[in-house]
Image: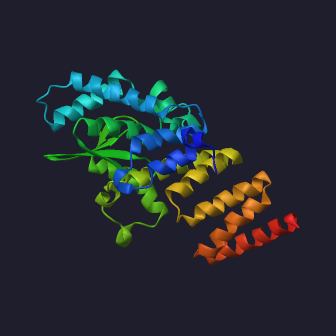
Amino acid sequence: MPPAFDFLTPPTPLAYFASLVGDDDQLPLLEAAVAIAQDEYPDLDVQNVLGEVDQLLARLRRRTPADADALQRLRALNQFFFRALGFGGNVNNYYDPDNSHLNVVMRTRRGIPITLAVLWLELAQGMGLKAMGINFPGHFMVKVNLPNGQVVIDPFTGQSLSREELSERLEPYKRRNGLVDDFDVPVGLYLQAAPGRDILARMLRNLKEIHRTAEDWLRLIAVQDRLLVLLPDAWVEYRDRGLAWAEMGDARLAVDDLAIYIDHTDDALDREAMAQRVQELKRALS
Protein backbone atom coordinates (compact mmCIF):
# COMPACT_ATOMS: atom_id res chain seq x y z
CA MET A 1 0.00 0.00 0.00
CA PRO A 2 1.45 3.45 -0.91
CA PRO A 3 2.18 5.88 1.92
CA ALA A 4 -0.72 8.07 2.97
CA PHE A 5 1.12 11.24 1.92
CA ASP A 6 1.58 10.18 -1.71
CA PHE A 7 -1.45 12.23 -2.74
CA LEU A 8 0.68 15.32 -2.04
CA THR A 9 3.27 14.29 -4.61
CA PRO A 10 2.96 16.58 -7.64
CA PRO A 11 2.43 14.91 -11.01
CA THR A 12 5.36 14.53 -13.34
CA PRO A 13 5.50 17.12 -16.14
CA LEU A 14 4.37 14.46 -18.62
CA ALA A 15 1.45 13.37 -16.41
CA TYR A 16 0.44 17.02 -15.96
CA PHE A 17 0.53 17.53 -19.74
CA ALA A 18 -1.54 14.38 -20.22
CA SER A 19 -4.17 15.68 -17.79
CA LEU A 20 -4.48 18.87 -19.86
CA VAL A 21 -4.84 17.28 -23.29
CA GLY A 22 -7.20 14.43 -22.51
CA ASP A 23 -10.37 16.13 -23.74
CA ASP A 24 -10.56 18.16 -26.95
CA ASP A 25 -13.61 20.08 -25.73
CA GLN A 26 -11.88 21.22 -22.54
CA LEU A 27 -8.29 21.54 -23.80
CA PRO A 28 -6.64 24.66 -22.27
CA LEU A 29 -4.35 25.61 -25.15
CA LEU A 30 -2.25 28.23 -23.39
CA GLU A 31 -1.69 26.14 -20.26
CA ALA A 32 -0.72 23.05 -22.27
CA ALA A 33 1.57 25.12 -24.50
CA VAL A 34 3.32 26.66 -21.49
CA ALA A 35 3.65 23.21 -19.89
CA ILE A 36 5.78 22.01 -22.83
CA ALA A 37 8.63 24.11 -21.42
CA GLN A 38 8.72 22.05 -18.20
CA ASP A 39 11.02 19.54 -19.88
CA GLU A 40 13.67 22.22 -20.26
CA TYR A 41 12.69 24.20 -17.15
CA PRO A 42 11.59 21.64 -14.53
CA ASP A 43 11.04 24.31 -11.86
CA LEU A 44 8.76 26.34 -14.13
CA ASP A 45 5.59 27.58 -12.45
CA VAL A 46 3.04 27.28 -15.25
CA GLN A 47 0.37 29.12 -13.28
CA ASN A 48 2.71 32.06 -12.84
CA VAL A 49 3.08 32.39 -16.63
CA LEU A 50 -0.70 32.18 -17.03
CA GLY A 51 -1.00 34.94 -14.44
CA GLU A 52 1.40 37.12 -16.43
CA VAL A 53 -0.75 36.70 -19.52
CA ASP A 54 -3.86 37.57 -17.47
CA GLN A 55 -2.12 40.76 -16.37
CA LEU A 56 -1.43 41.68 -19.99
CA LEU A 57 -5.10 41.10 -20.82
CA ALA A 58 -6.16 43.34 -17.94
CA ARG A 59 -3.83 46.09 -19.22
CA LEU A 60 -5.23 45.71 -22.73
CA ARG A 61 -8.81 45.96 -21.49
CA ARG A 62 -8.01 49.16 -19.61
CA ARG A 63 -6.62 50.64 -22.83
CA THR A 64 -9.68 49.74 -24.90
CA PRO A 65 -13.00 51.66 -24.75
CA ALA A 66 -15.78 49.57 -23.31
CA ASP A 67 -17.98 50.25 -26.35
CA ALA A 68 -15.29 49.39 -28.92
CA ASP A 69 -16.53 47.26 -31.80
CA ALA A 70 -14.71 44.14 -33.01
CA LEU A 71 -12.49 45.97 -35.50
CA GLN A 72 -11.51 48.56 -32.89
CA ARG A 73 -10.69 45.79 -30.41
CA LEU A 74 -8.55 44.05 -33.02
CA ARG A 75 -6.64 47.26 -33.74
CA ALA A 76 -6.16 47.88 -30.02
CA LEU A 77 -4.85 44.34 -29.57
CA ASN A 78 -2.35 44.60 -32.41
CA GLN A 79 -1.15 48.00 -31.26
CA PHE A 80 -0.65 46.64 -27.73
CA PHE A 81 0.88 43.27 -28.63
CA PHE A 82 3.17 44.16 -31.51
CA ARG A 83 4.01 47.78 -30.74
CA ALA A 84 3.55 48.61 -27.05
CA LEU A 85 4.82 45.23 -25.82
CA GLY A 86 7.13 44.65 -28.78
CA PHE A 87 6.33 41.00 -29.45
CA GLY A 88 7.79 39.77 -32.73
CA GLY A 89 9.72 37.10 -34.52
CA ASN A 90 13.20 36.05 -33.46
CA VAL A 91 14.79 36.73 -36.84
CA ASN A 92 18.34 36.49 -35.47
CA ASN A 93 18.01 33.04 -33.92
CA TYR A 94 14.93 31.41 -35.42
CA TYR A 95 15.90 27.83 -34.48
CA ASP A 96 16.65 28.52 -30.83
CA PRO A 97 14.59 25.97 -28.83
CA ASP A 98 13.61 28.74 -26.42
CA ASN A 99 11.45 30.23 -29.17
CA SER A 100 9.13 27.30 -28.42
CA HIS A 101 9.15 27.85 -24.63
CA LEU A 102 6.43 30.33 -23.76
CA ASN A 103 7.96 31.33 -20.43
CA VAL A 104 11.01 32.58 -22.35
CA VAL A 105 8.92 34.16 -25.13
CA MET A 106 7.04 36.12 -22.47
CA ARG A 107 10.33 37.45 -21.10
CA THR A 108 12.19 38.17 -24.34
CA ARG A 109 9.16 39.13 -26.45
CA ARG A 110 10.69 37.03 -29.24
CA GLY A 111 9.43 33.76 -30.66
CA ILE A 112 8.37 31.84 -33.73
CA PRO A 113 4.98 32.23 -35.44
CA ILE A 114 3.19 29.51 -33.49
CA THR A 115 4.27 30.57 -29.99
CA LEU A 116 3.54 34.22 -30.73
CA ALA A 117 0.19 33.08 -32.10
CA VAL A 118 -0.72 31.16 -28.94
CA LEU A 119 -0.15 34.26 -26.80
CA TRP A 120 -1.94 36.53 -29.28
CA LEU A 121 -4.91 34.16 -29.45
CA GLU A 122 -5.27 34.13 -25.67
CA LEU A 123 -5.47 37.92 -25.63
CA ALA A 124 -7.74 38.07 -28.68
CA GLN A 125 -10.22 35.60 -27.23
CA GLY A 126 -10.05 37.42 -23.91
CA MET A 127 -11.14 40.54 -25.79
CA GLY A 128 -14.15 38.71 -27.16
CA LEU A 129 -12.77 38.36 -30.68
CA LYS A 130 -13.58 35.34 -32.83
CA ALA A 131 -9.91 34.46 -33.28
CA MET A 132 -8.43 31.13 -34.39
CA GLY A 133 -5.10 29.67 -35.37
CA ILE A 134 -4.37 28.50 -38.92
CA ASN A 135 -2.04 25.61 -39.76
CA PHE A 136 -0.84 27.45 -42.86
CA PRO A 137 1.94 25.54 -44.68
CA GLY A 138 5.37 26.55 -43.47
CA HIS A 139 4.22 29.47 -41.32
CA PHE A 140 1.53 29.45 -38.63
CA MET A 141 -1.08 32.22 -38.97
CA VAL A 142 -4.04 33.60 -37.04
CA LYS A 143 -7.35 34.89 -38.25
CA VAL A 144 -10.25 36.91 -36.86
CA ASN A 145 -13.80 36.75 -38.13
CA LEU A 146 -15.32 40.23 -38.18
CA PRO A 147 -18.86 41.30 -39.14
CA ASN A 148 -17.60 42.51 -42.53
CA GLY A 149 -15.14 39.74 -43.30
CA GLN A 150 -12.07 37.85 -42.21
CA VAL A 151 -8.63 39.21 -41.30
CA VAL A 152 -5.57 36.94 -41.56
CA ILE A 153 -2.48 38.05 -39.62
CA ASP A 154 1.12 36.88 -39.61
CA PRO A 155 1.97 36.69 -35.87
CA PHE A 156 5.69 36.89 -36.68
CA THR A 157 5.35 40.46 -37.98
CA GLY A 158 1.85 41.59 -37.08
CA GLN A 159 1.11 42.14 -40.77
CA SER A 160 -2.40 41.64 -42.15
CA LEU A 161 -2.30 39.59 -45.33
CA SER A 162 -4.53 39.84 -48.38
CA ARG A 163 -5.70 36.83 -50.39
CA GLU A 164 -3.14 37.73 -53.06
CA GLU A 165 -0.31 37.80 -50.51
CA LEU A 166 -1.43 34.47 -49.05
CA SER A 167 -1.55 32.97 -52.54
CA GLU A 168 2.02 34.15 -53.18
CA ARG A 169 3.21 32.53 -49.97
CA LEU A 170 1.51 29.28 -50.97
CA GLU A 171 3.10 29.04 -54.42
CA PRO A 172 6.36 27.29 -53.38
CA TYR A 173 4.42 24.77 -51.26
CA LYS A 174 1.98 24.06 -54.09
CA ARG A 175 4.78 23.56 -56.61
CA ARG A 176 6.65 21.17 -54.31
CA ASN A 177 3.53 19.09 -53.80
CA GLY A 178 2.19 19.15 -57.35
CA LEU A 179 -0.85 21.25 -56.43
CA VAL A 180 -0.94 23.20 -59.69
CA ASP A 181 -3.17 23.42 -62.75
CA ASP A 182 -5.88 20.74 -62.47
CA PHE A 183 -4.73 19.84 -58.96
CA ASP A 184 -4.85 23.40 -57.60
CA VAL A 185 -7.08 24.10 -54.59
CA PRO A 186 -8.51 27.42 -53.32
CA VAL A 187 -6.61 29.47 -50.76
CA GLY A 188 -9.56 29.16 -48.39
CA LEU A 189 -8.82 25.47 -47.83
CA TYR A 190 -5.52 26.48 -46.21
CA LEU A 191 -7.27 28.90 -43.84
CA GLN A 192 -9.29 26.42 -41.80
CA ALA A 193 -9.22 26.85 -38.02
CA ALA A 194 -6.68 24.59 -36.31
CA PRO A 195 -7.88 22.64 -33.24
CA GLY A 196 -5.84 23.06 -30.07
CA ARG A 197 -4.46 19.52 -30.36
CA ASP A 198 -3.08 20.29 -33.82
CA ILE A 199 -1.47 23.51 -32.58
CA LEU A 200 0.29 21.67 -29.76
CA ALA A 201 1.43 18.94 -32.16
CA ARG A 202 2.93 21.56 -34.46
CA MET A 203 4.73 23.18 -31.54
CA LEU A 204 6.17 19.84 -30.48
CA ARG A 205 7.20 18.89 -33.99
CA ASN A 206 9.07 22.17 -34.33
CA LEU A 207 11.05 21.23 -31.22
CA LYS A 208 11.44 17.68 -32.49
CA GLU A 209 13.10 18.88 -35.68
CA ILE A 210 15.43 21.21 -33.78
CA HIS A 211 16.57 18.41 -31.45
CA ARG A 212 16.90 15.87 -34.26
CA THR A 213 19.06 18.28 -36.28
CA ALA A 214 21.23 18.81 -33.20
CA GLU A 215 21.29 15.04 -32.53
CA ASP A 216 20.10 15.82 -29.01
CA TRP A 217 18.46 12.45 -28.50
CA LEU A 218 17.52 12.86 -24.83
CA ARG A 219 15.57 16.04 -25.51
CA LEU A 220 14.09 14.50 -28.64
CA ILE A 221 12.76 11.55 -26.62
CA ALA A 222 11.11 13.93 -24.16
CA VAL A 223 9.34 15.62 -27.07
CA GLN A 224 8.32 12.23 -28.49
CA ASP A 225 6.85 11.26 -25.12
CA ARG A 226 4.60 14.32 -25.28
CA LEU A 227 3.66 13.74 -28.90
CA LEU A 228 2.54 10.22 -28.07
CA VAL A 229 0.47 11.45 -25.14
CA LEU A 230 -1.09 14.02 -27.44
CA LEU A 231 -1.45 11.74 -30.49
CA PRO A 232 -1.51 8.13 -29.27
CA ASP A 233 -2.30 6.77 -32.76
CA ALA A 234 0.52 8.66 -34.51
CA TRP A 235 2.50 5.48 -35.17
CA VAL A 236 5.36 7.29 -36.89
CA GLU A 237 6.15 8.95 -33.57
CA TYR A 238 6.81 5.50 -32.10
CA ARG A 239 9.25 4.89 -34.93
CA ASP A 240 11.04 8.17 -34.34
CA ARG A 241 11.23 7.60 -30.59
CA GLY A 242 12.54 4.10 -31.20
CA LEU A 243 15.26 5.41 -33.49
CA ALA A 244 16.20 7.98 -30.86
CA TRP A 245 16.42 5.23 -28.21
CA ALA A 246 18.72 3.33 -30.56
CA GLU A 247 20.95 6.40 -30.87
CA MET A 248 20.99 6.59 -27.06
CA GLY A 249 22.18 2.98 -26.93
CA ASP A 250 19.02 1.53 -25.37
CA ALA A 251 18.29 -1.31 -27.78
CA ARG A 252 15.48 -2.80 -25.69
CA LEU A 253 13.35 0.36 -25.64
CA ALA A 254 14.18 0.94 -29.29
CA VAL A 255 12.91 -2.53 -30.23
CA ASP A 256 9.70 -2.02 -28.24
CA ASP A 257 8.85 1.23 -30.04
CA LEU A 258 9.85 0.04 -33.49
CA ALA A 259 7.77 -3.12 -33.06
CA ILE A 260 4.68 -0.99 -32.35
CA TYR A 261 5.37 1.02 -35.50
CA ILE A 262 5.88 -2.08 -37.63
CA ASP A 263 2.58 -3.54 -36.41
CA HIS A 264 0.62 -0.45 -37.43
CA THR A 265 2.26 1.23 -40.41
CA ASP A 266 0.87 1.04 -43.94
CA ASP A 267 4.24 1.96 -45.45
CA ALA A 268 5.55 -1.38 -46.69
CA LEU A 269 9.03 -0.13 -47.62
CA ASP A 270 9.55 1.58 -44.29
CA ARG A 271 8.15 -1.43 -42.45
CA GLU A 272 10.80 -3.60 -44.10
CA ALA A 273 13.57 -1.13 -43.27
CA MET A 274 12.48 -0.90 -39.64
CA ALA A 275 12.18 -4.70 -39.39
CA GLN A 276 15.80 -4.95 -40.46
CA ARG A 277 16.73 -2.35 -37.86
CA VAL A 278 14.93 -4.36 -35.18
CA GLN A 279 16.89 -7.47 -36.14
CA GLU A 280 20.15 -5.53 -35.81
CA LEU A 281 19.11 -4.26 -32.39
CA LYS A 282 18.08 -7.72 -31.22
CA ARG A 283 21.47 -9.06 -32.20
CA ALA A 284 23.03 -6.34 -30.09
CA LEU A 285 20.91 -7.50 -27.16
CA SER A 286 21.84 -11.19 -27.48
What residue is drawn where x is 51% and y is 45%? 16
**Quadrant housing residue 154:** top left
Q: Is residue 286 left or right of residue 162?
A: right
What residue is drawn where x is 38% and y is 45%? 28
Please state which of residues 165 and 265 is positioned toward the viewer in this rendering: 265
Q: Where is residue 86 in the image (x, y as percent from the top left)?
A: 39, 24
What residue is drawn where x is 17% and y is 32%? 72
**Quadrant housing residue 39:** top right
In this view of the protein, can residue 109 be seen by the observer?
no
Please state which of residues 284 and 184 is positioned toward the viewer in this rendering: 284
Please state which of residues 83 and 20 is positioned toward the viewer in this rendering: 20
Q: Where is residue 61 in the image (x, y as percent from the top left)?
A: 23, 26
Q: Is residue 41 left or right of residue 184?
A: right
What residue is drawn where x is 66% and y is 75%? 269
Q: Position of residue 40 (x, y in %)?
A: 61, 36
Residue furthest left as drawn:
67
Residue furthest right as drawn:
286
